[in-house]
Amino acid sequence: MSRGRAGPSAHRISIPTPLPVGRVNCWLLAGEPLTLIDAGPNHPDSLAALEAGLHEHGVRVEDVELLVLTHQHVDHVGNASAIVERSGCRVAAHEQLVGYARELRRRYELESAYQDAVMALHGTPLERRLRFWTAIADRAAYWNDSVEVDIALVEDDTLVAGGRTLRVSHRPGHSPTDTIFVDDELGVAYVADHLLPHVSSNPLAARPPRGSDDPRDRVSSVRAYLSSLERTARDDLAELRPGHGRVIDDHRALIALRRQGHLERMEQVATALGDGPMSARAIGDAIWPGIAITQTYLTLCEALGGLDLLEERGRVRQVETDGVVRYERVPARSTRAG
């Protein structure tokens, strides 16, 4: 079989979501065990579309034997428990997703508290944070009950799914639990939101699966993401099957484009900072004036990503006063005459 062509046994089922991201891809692998990659959110329209998509290929939710979860976001795992309840299928996921899946609603609450702490530390006033949480309050309903992971996966494990052997690789950045599943024989990878064809995957500041909840100990999502992209660029792949949008057939060119985009954002942040000191919130507002309240956290994380890259290069430093972190330029070292 030619590389990048998995034949009639792999099918993309694109389902609607009530979220700003729009449609999400679930992938049906029709061999043994009958496998579904990702579950969609807990929403009746999403479930109805999934049922219809499965029906087109002659199967039902009840026929699913293995559910593979790629990462922790609600548009991918929110409806997992309903699929398990109806089918009795086994669930496979990276070991770092196991605890999250076991208590989905509780982890969503902890993640929300962490995000609020990040916003406060980086200069978002309480009133604005309250308006943000009110604006997105309906999203909590898109999680379903918790689900138990039967097969906890680690790096380079192999998983038989839909008659194919998939290699497991943890690629954090977009989320701490991002996992891709690689069919090395075909040169195909199921990458979820690790790499998307039409938009950059947002490396949001996220509560670590293990470790400190203090936002001062935040792990740089953008640095992790760029490192993961470098690994993916080294993979010999003919086709990437993402969590949203069309199939990707030139992943190295797209990765180069995404990397350049982050470097350009870094310079945009540097320009907005000027001499500083400025908070990440103030920088985000300077770059995106008048943004919708629902984009408050996203734009803060975009600013933080640029600042993380500048800090890594020794161009900025943090100064915390009155519980708010601000950034300022590091003066260029003077050059002495020899």
Image (tube, rainbow, N blue to C red):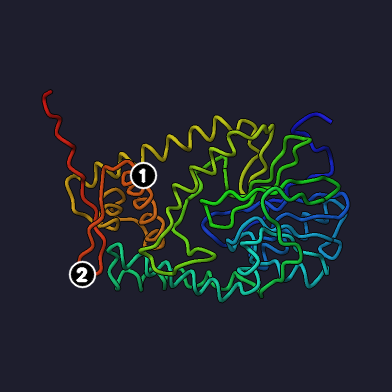
Q: Amino acid at mark 1?
A: Leu
Indicate which disc residue 309 carries: 1
In x, y percent, where is residue 269?
Answer: 29, 45
Compared across the picture, whether 277 is left or right of 70 comes to left
Q: Quadrant of the N terminus?
A: top right
* Residue 78 lies in quadrant: bottom right
In x, y percent, where is residue 119?
Answer: 35, 65
Identity of the residue furthest to the left in this view: 337
* Residue 107 lies in quadrant: bottom right
Indicate which disc residue 322 carries: 2
Q: CA distance from mark 1 to mark 2?
A: 25 Å
- Do the residues under discs 1 and 2 have CB atoms within 8 angstroms? no
The residue nearer to you, when weighing 88 against 155, is 155
Q: Amino acid at mark 2?
A: Asp
Say what secondary structure mark 1 lies in: helix
Is 249 placed above or below 241 here? Answer: above
The residue nearer to you, when weighing 299 against 326, is 326
* Residue 104 lies in quadrant: bottom right
Residue density around tag 1, few if under 14, some if 14–19, many if 20 or more, within 10 Å: many
Residue at horizontal 41%, vertical 40%?
A: 262
Residue at horizontal 69%, vertical 61%?
A: 39
Identity of the residue furthest to the front in this view: 338
Compared across the picture, whether 217 is left or right of 186 comes to left
